[in-house]
Amino acid sequence: GENVEQHPSTLSVQEGDSAVIKCTYSDSASNYFPWYKQELGKRPQLIIDIRSNVGEKKDQRIAVTLNKTAKHFSLHITETQPEDSAVYFCAASMTSGTYKYIFGTGTRLKVLA
Amino acid sequence: DGGITQSPKYLFRKEGQNVTLSCEQNLNHDAMYWYRQDPGQGLRLIYYSQIVNDFQKGDIAEGYSVSREKKESFPLTVTSAQKNPTAFYLCASSIVIGTTIYFGEGSWLTVV
């Protein structure tokens, strides 16, 4: 079946450095790719998303890139801060009227002060 | 996000009991979802509903039941058949199926 692979599972970076998390999806019909941030004990919150007709999207220190040919998309966080420490989930979805919202397994990001 | 209310936030269940988690949304969303999250793990889909009076099983529906009698409400019952129900339960909704999913604040269920 369809799946989304997410790497790495854990990532530690020094404050101020960049962090990159990568996801690979299997269903070539996927056309929507959101990223969620989940702090400890809280709900996942949408931080950025991208649609298949766009190759890159930026919002301040975060950006997402999409390579449809390779079927992978990545989250980039620049100038990391301690408050960026959380678990990040990617997802791949197909806006087709059926449930095709497949989540990755999550990446635990630790930003070391 | 702010329009999805889950209750209770913390719930304790005795062995053999059924418990019901409430989820209400005022976003006028057609689609609603229930996910289970075990500590340090990802999100697993229990049930989803595209529209009132319709719902579909997700990946781990055994031991759970739902109803969708009103557009704004999607309660989840954890039955005694669910042998290991201790987890964080997240309700979510989206405008229609396949669009951006937004989560409620979650409910912690512990078996005592």
Image: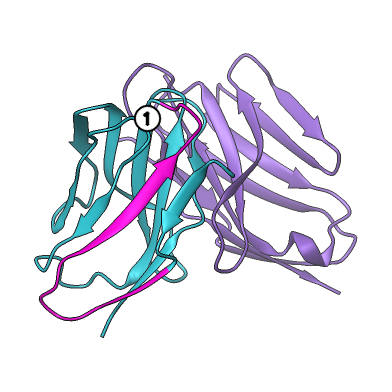
Tell which chain the image draws in cyan. B
When the figure is inspected, residue B43 is found, relative to residue B69, above or below; the finding is: below
Hey, what amino acid is under mark 1?
Answer: Ala
Q: Colour of chain A?
A: purple
Q: Residue at x 40, y 44 (%)?
A: B24
| Residue on which the image places disc 1 | B31
- The residue lying toward the viewer, choosing from B100 and B14, is B14
Residue A69 point in image, percent of width and height: 55, 21
Q: Is residue B59 left or right of residue A94?
A: left
Task: Find out whether residue A74 is within the magenta segment.
Answer: no
CA neighbours of label 1 inside 10 A, class few (<14), some (14 to 19), many (20+): many
Q: What percent of the width, then of the height, locates residue B69?
A: 22, 34
| Residue B17 drawn at (x, y percent) | 14, 73
Residue A42 sits in quarter = bottom right
How does the figure colour the protein chain or chains? by chain
Query: Is residue B16 shown in magenta?
Result: yes
Q: Which is more toward the observer, B73 or A28?
A: B73
Q: Quadrant of the N terminus of chain A?
A: top left
Q: Is residue B27 above or below residue B112?
A: above
Task: Tell me which residue sits at (70%, 35%) in the image.
Answer: A64
Residue at 28% from the left image edge and 48% from the top image edge = B75
Left/right placement of residue A99 relative to residue B18 reads right
Secondary structure beneath dot 1 equals strand
Residue B79 shown left or right of residue A87 in the figure: left
Q: Pick whichever, A5 or B87, lies toward us.
A: B87
Where the C terminus of chain A falls, by quadrant?
bottom right
Q: Chain of mark 1?
A: B
Q: Residue furthest bottom?
A: B112
Q: State the residue at coordinates (46%, 24%).
A: B95
Name the spot of residue A24 as percent of width and height, x first. Answer: 51, 39
Residue B97 horizontal side relative to residue B5, left or right: left
Start and end of the magenta stretch?
A: B10-29
